[in-house]
Amino acid sequence: MRVNFDREKQWWDAKAPKEEQDTWDEDVNRALRWREIERRLDGVETVLCVGGGTGAFSIPLAQRGLRVTHVDFSPHMLHIARDKARGVAGIQFIEANAADLSQFADRSFDLVLNMDGAISFCGSEAETAILESCRVTGKTLIATVTHRALMIVVLCSTGLQLTGRFMPALDAMWDDGEWHQEQFPDNPLLAEGMTQDYCGAIKAFLPHQLRSMLEGAGMRVLRCGGLGSLALLCGRDTVETVRADTQLWERFLALCERFDREVLPNGPGTRQRAGLIAVAQPR
């Protein structure tokens, strides 16, 4: 199914005010992405932040003196980000779709960040969004996408709770990694209570699929796997306990990284936000 980007834009506009209001393991996910970014900043002068939202990553990087281009296709996200960035030099904001970065030349940014929904919520255009980010990457690309493993779990459990059966959306996610609100008649049940009772078009990936796409785009993959699976498995109570103590929090983040690296490298990641991360460089 083709993506109705006008509908998607309305949805992301409505989500903008709460974009940085993290719930239980969302801030684990965000903190782990920051740790990966910190490891990749040597020699970086220019940054492209695709799907930059309200500026959670782009603005702090600009405040460090990097030249940052912040791209999002939600006007309201951009409006909030511009307000937050008042007085910050070295950042520009551009409205554009992650699946079309044609205004930027090949290899034009040292570091490209394409995280959260900018790839996966392109739905059927997700692979194009990946290829576009690869094309403009000069040194390093960090991308996060929806993990198919977690989506299978969510659709399995939530669908069963709502309907007493396993819904067709589960099979579609298992086989193709795709979700569309209009895909099956009972899909809207799964979106009730979300922003505008809607959940946009999704393309979810398994680690080997994402790795294959990146390698096919001429990239050398340094990392590809789950992000924060330990937080998911430990559960909300553990995350809330460590979040209240700075020392426990830093120790827990280090444990999450070690778990992702040594124990469950292809694990499902956190429940909230994109649970699959890849770091790649042009060959």
Image (cartoon, rainbow, N blue to C red):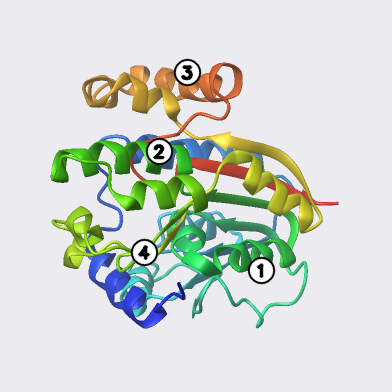
Q: Which amino acid does label 3 sit on?
A: Leu
- CA separation, marks 3 and 1? 33 Å
Instruction: Give the vertical position of 270 relative to 204 (above or below).
Output: above
Tag 2 secondary structure = helix
Question: Going from the N terminus, do you reach mark 4 or mark 2 first?
Answer: 2
Write down the quadrant of residue 179 in the picture: bottom left
- CA separation, marks 4 and 2? 16 Å
Q: Nearer the viewer, mark 4 or mark 3?
A: 4
Q: Nearer the viewer, mark 4 or mark 2?
A: 4
Q: Position of residue 120 (x, y in %)?
A: 48, 58
Instruction: Give the vertical position of 282 relative to 244 (above or below).
Output: below
List the residue tagged with mark 4. Answer: 180
Residue 132, numbered circle: 1
Q: Which of marks 3 and 1 is in front?
A: 1
Residue 73, numbered circle: none
The 10 Å Cα crowd at callout 3, few under 14, some 14 to 19, many 20 or more, is some
The 10 Å Cα crowd at callout 1, few under 14, some 14 to 19, many 20 or more, is some
Q: What residue type is labelled 1?
A: Glu
The residue under the point 28% across, 27% down is: 243
List the residue tagged with mark 3. Answer: 255
The residue under the point 74% across, 43% down is: 221
- CA separation, marks 3 and 2? 20 Å
Question: Going from the N terminus, do you reach mark 2 or mark 1 first?
Answer: 1
List the residue tagged with mark 2. Answer: 150
Q: Quadrant of the N terminus?
A: bottom left
Front-lying residue, 246 or 150? 150
The residue under the point 86% across, 51% down is: 283
